[in-house]
Amino acid sequence: MNTHVWRGFASDNYAGVHPEILDAIVRANEGHQVAYGDDEGTQRLEKLFAHHFGDGAKVFPLFNGTGANVVSLQGMLSSWEAVICASSSHLNVDEGGAPEKVAGIKLWTIPTEDGKLTPELISQQAWGFGDVHRAQPAVVSITQVTELGTLYSVEEIKELSAYVHSHGMKLHMDGARIANAAASLGVNLRDFTTDAGVDVLSFGGTKNGGMGCEAVVVLNPDLGAGIPYVRKSSMQLASKMRFISAQLEALLEGNLWLQNAGHANEMAKRLEKAVAEIQGVTIVRKVQANSVFALLPLAVSERLQKKFRFYVWNQATGEVRWMCSWDTTEADVDSFVRAIAEEISVSE
């Protein structure tokens, strides 16, 4: 048995599963339950999501974030329509081409400085309505927290939704780190989703202590009729759905979702504060959730990566990304900071 335990700052997907979620999975394993989402746990989950997102919210659990995004968008689009998104979005960069390959979705991408879209930026692609030669812009997809660690405020999302809806389009949110956003903003989940005009949400639980628990949440009651069929044809319908639902229920029935996300955010702030005092390290983006972006000499990053896993975000500039997780400890952060300082001193 490999007993080596190591800690890294590469991704919140590297973290283990929260013990309370493991316990919930074990409890869900008792006896037989009806398959494909007709189990008791999934029925309870529907009420729980309605509590957090409003009475009209409909939840569809599935396996992973890519699946949640593809199923969400496919359920919102006709075959001739397209999605507007930031060029840095996970949808465009890190889905392995799944939107295009699996769903045949055209992505109209927009470069951004901070990963966030604005009405002015969206207008660069929101045109050609009625032009048979152009894939019709029908959905705008935003990410909360963005891939660059930035946050949309409640008011910014309201402004976006008003603009999107005024052009006859719909608003989708990739919420892989939605709990981190809520914890940082200090608001309820529905404040910047349902109440801000988001139509469909990809809800993320895996990065917040789950084993594999994501969901499509339809917030606009006029949408979502095709989601059950799209989920099945996209190979995202779990036969033993109770084990996905049990994880989401464990996160949302109390404050575990907020506790986990808040802790990860706090550890990122601790890391930011400590490395800011190291000469030779430059923080390049404001830390708003659980990620820290910084500039390091590439030689320093290469030596550090032999001890701690993390990603070099931009090879040309030396920008790195450090992610904190629900289980990142103060000792993890302090040990990492010491290693950074040591490697920087070697390079001087």
Image (cartoon, grey):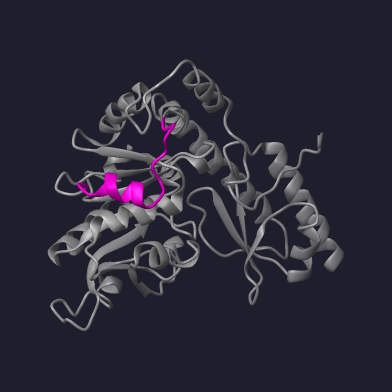
Residue 43 in the image: state x and y as whole percent: 30, 26
Q: Is residue 190 above or below residue 148?
A: above
Q: Which stretch is magenta?
A: 224-241
Q: Nearer the viewer, residue 19 or 96?
A: 96
Residue 37 in the image: above or below residue 221: above
Residue depicted at x 55% and y 52%: 291
Horizontally, is 138 left or right of 66 in the view? left
Q: In which quarter of the image is the N terminus?
A: top right
- In terms of depth relative to the viewer, which is nearer, 253 or 226? 226
The answer to whether residue 233 is left or right of residue 167 is right
Q: Which residue is drawn at 31% across and 52% down?
A: 72
As drawn, the residue found furthest toward the bottom would be: 133
Find residue 339 and report its horizontal and vertical position in percent.
79, 52
Q: Do we see residue 187 in this rendering?
A: no
317 to the left or right of 300: left
Residue positioned 72% across, 65% down in the render = 280
In the displayed structure, does residue 254 sit left or right of residue 290? left
